[in-house]
């Protein structure tokens, strides 16, 4: 596998950014003030810093209308290098051919005991959860299934022998926010959600942000990366596609990067996607 190409791809878009929480509900691990994330998306590409976030805690609960298996189509619709020409990430220009090229994969959401799941923070006008509903199953992402499908959608056929470099995707049983993608050649991509925030204007609209710390193991030198994904979702119960999303992935330099202090908290690359969900 071309390891340099792999790093460039993940710098363009986190393989787990969508998977681990681009579809958060109002989670008590961090609810942003109303409008902060919406204003951030509206300001694209003028992003000068990371958004206000809270430490990620527990697993993530999803709205009940995400239940089941979905056919997801994601399309890169815009990209920007805010610090160009001084700072441009490797592979930025080579990603332009991906513009307007849809990529499809399957994803599913399953019921889980609320024991290890972060409970939603409901709007004030909604009655509190009863003891029975607090014990009711909640929806979570099937991360291993979703992560493997998403990784293969991007990477199938990219190996030197024409095979997929992706062997498996595993979730840390002690930390639902930590995911490991196993690659050929005894290499791994470890991605951990460190911070998140969400906001919602209505029952059919919500916005999420997650910050990922990524570590590439198995290369001659361990490589670190920081990725933010901010996504606005809209539910269309009587239309097709049933769910649409406006998603922006931001790449930040890690403290190990020699240009880290030059960039500061500003993103060095921004990628905007349109996502569509159809019953699969």
Image (cartoon, rainbow, N blue to C red):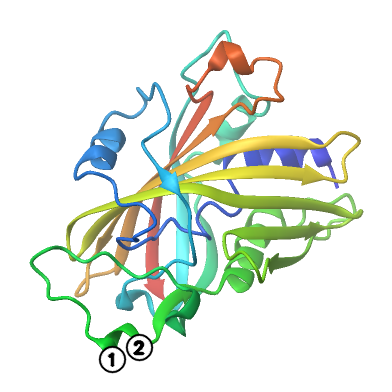
- Reading the image, the residue beneath label 1 is 132
Residue at the (61%, 64%) spot, across then down: 175
Q: Position of residue 94 (x, y in %)?
A: 64, 30
Mark 1 surroundings within 10 Å by alpha-carbon count, few (fewer than 14), some (14 through 19), many (20 or more): few
Q: Position of residue 122 (x, y in %)?
A: 21, 66
Q: Secondary structure at mark 1?
A: helix
Mark 2 surroundings within 10 Å by alpha-carbon count, few (fewer than 14), some (14 through 19), many (20 or more): few
Q: Secondary structure at mark 2?
A: loop
Residue at the (34%, 60%) spot, across then down: 28
- Quadrant of the image occupied by residue 276: bottom left
Image check: 170 left or right of 77?
Answer: right
Q: Position of residue 118 (x, y in %)?
A: 41, 68
- Real-space Cα separation, disc 2 to disc 1, in angstroms: 6 Å
In the foreground, 163 or 250:
250
- Reading the image, the residue beneath label 2 is 136
For this orientation, the residue located farthest to the front is 131
Residue at the (61%, 26%) spot, across then down: 253
């Amino acid at each position: 596998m071309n390891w340099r190409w792999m790093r460039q791809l993940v710098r363009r878009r986190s393989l787990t950014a969508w998977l681990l929480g681009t579809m958060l509900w109002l989670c008590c691990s961090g609810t942003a003030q109303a409008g902060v994330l919406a204003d951030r998306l509206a300001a694209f590409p003028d992003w000068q810093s990371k958004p206000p976030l809270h430490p990620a805690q527990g697993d993530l609960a999803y709205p009940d209308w995400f239940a089941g298996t979905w056919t997801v189509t994601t399309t890169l619709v815009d990209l920007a290098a805010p610090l160009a020409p001084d700072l441009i990430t490797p592979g930025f220009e080579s990603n332009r051919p991906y513009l307007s090229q849809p990529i499809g994969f399957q994803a599913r959401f399953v019921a889980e005991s609320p024991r290890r799941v972060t409970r939603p923070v409901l709007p004030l006008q909604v009655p509190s959860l009863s003891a029975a509903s607090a014990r009711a199953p909640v929806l979570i992402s099937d991360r291993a299934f979703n992560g493997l499908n998403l990784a293969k959608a991007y990477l199938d056929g990219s190996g030197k022998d024409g095979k997929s470099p992706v062997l498996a995707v595993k979730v840390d049983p002690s930390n639902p926010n930590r995911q490991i993608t196993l690659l050929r050649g005894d290499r791994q991509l470890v991605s951990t959600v460190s911070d998140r925030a969400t906001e919602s204007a209505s029952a059919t609209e919500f916005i999420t942000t997650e910050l990922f710390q990524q570590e590439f193991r198995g290369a001659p030198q361990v490589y670190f990366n920081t990725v933010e994904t901010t996504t606005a979702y809209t539910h269309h119960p009587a239309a097709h596609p049933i769910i649409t999303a406006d998603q922006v992935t931001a790449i930040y330099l890690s403290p190990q990067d020699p240009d880290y202090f030059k960039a500061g908290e500003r993103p060095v690359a921004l990628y905007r996607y349109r996502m569509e969900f159809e019953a699969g």
